[in-house]
Amino acid sequence: MSCAAWVYLVFFHGGFWRSTLSANELPNPDLPEWPDVLVVIPARNEADVISRTVLSLQQQDYSRPVSIVLVDDNSNDGTAAIARAAAEEAGHADRLAVVDGAPLAPGWTGKVWAMAQGVAHADSIAPQARYILFSDADIEHAPSNLRRLVHTAETEGKDLVSIMVMLMTKGFWERFLIPPFVFFFQMLYPFSRVNDDTRDTAAAAGGCMLVRRSALHRSGGMDAIKGALIDDCALARSLADAGGRLSLSLDAKTRSTRPYGGFSGIWNMVARSAYTQLRYSPWLLMGCIMGMALVYGVPLLVVLAFGWLAPITVLAGLATYILMCVAYIPTLRLYDRPLYTAVFLPLAGMLYTAMTISSAVRHWRGVGGGWKGRVYQQ
């Protein structure tokens, strides 16, 4: 069964494992006319990363001025002042508007509430802008990023163009667990199926999402996802349900500058919302645990116990393990990791399963998810 699962995943699951890169790897695109774009950044206590994000956005090689709306959601670390200083350094202080975040409205999650305030301010200062770029506060954008996002949206008629940026992998646990995180995300949402308008798969990567303004309003705007903990995929689903067309890819040049804080940081990142992904269903949790055990645990156990199993079982287990490792290699290459580390993917899979169980336990205890120090009961 495990071998059959990997045969399906590798050959019949949208080629998710190929780690297809975005247009940032292609020659510079061009358009007869470039539309206006306004950037919205929800920010809460981002003093350590916001400067590089603002600078990278104001240094885009886009042919039109790029204005930024930063929603400072009650930060207490000087986030707004640092952002203003970065805009001044770039010589475009007039292109940064800082909005003081209003108190969290009932029924909203913090990040989505900040995004909604950014959209409202954008509507008042730049109603002519065709697109809104939602950027996390820790994203250092490649100089050509905005131009390529807009080119994809304009030439392919996409309403949401999102890229999964390169995540930081400085420490041991980041190098061990972040590439599998990207691999699992691709497995859950095969990018080729997200990009196929005939498919119902909807997903996005929240760090960098270019949204066509007309499609956003047609889908009900941010109000439609006001209680979402996983805002990116919720927004993608909302747009798709309203007839929007999606594009999702990887990008090796635009990067997250946020450190994860080692093992505990990654654990908390996943446990914060993993059970939300399972729609708070104990049955889906059970299915997830059994599925992860079948796909990742069984090949490892068979290989470790080869001396006590029939030869045909060992051969099937080895074939499954090899297939799994081969599928993981493109992600390892993307993150410049040694190829031999593919053999440790089952261990990472078991750790992510434990994180998902922890997410469910947090929900059952009434802790729920959260954003930047806020915790929501779900």
Image (spheres, grey):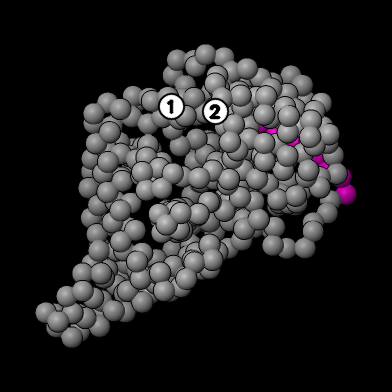
Question: Looking at the rendered structure, which numbered label has been put on residue 45?
Answer: 2
Q: Nearer the viewer, residue 221 or 41?
A: 41
Vertical position of residue 277 compared to residue 88: above or below: below
Q: CA distance from mark 1 to mark 2?
A: 10 Å
The residue that disc 1 covers is 373
Q: Residues within 10 Å of mark 1 (few under 14, many from 20)?
A: few
Residue at the far right: name it. 32
Vertical position of residue 18 compared to residue 130: above or below: below
- For the residue marked with disc 1, what is the amino acid? Gly
Q: Quadrant of residue 72?
A: top right
Question: Looking at the rendered structure, which numbered label has been put on residue 93?
Answer: none
Element at label 2: loop
Vertical position of residue 328 compared to residue 51: above or below: below
The magenta stretch is 32-40
**Residue depicted at x 37% and y 31%:** 369
Query: What is the x, y in percent for residue 356?
Result: 30, 45
Residue 38, magenta (yes or no): yes
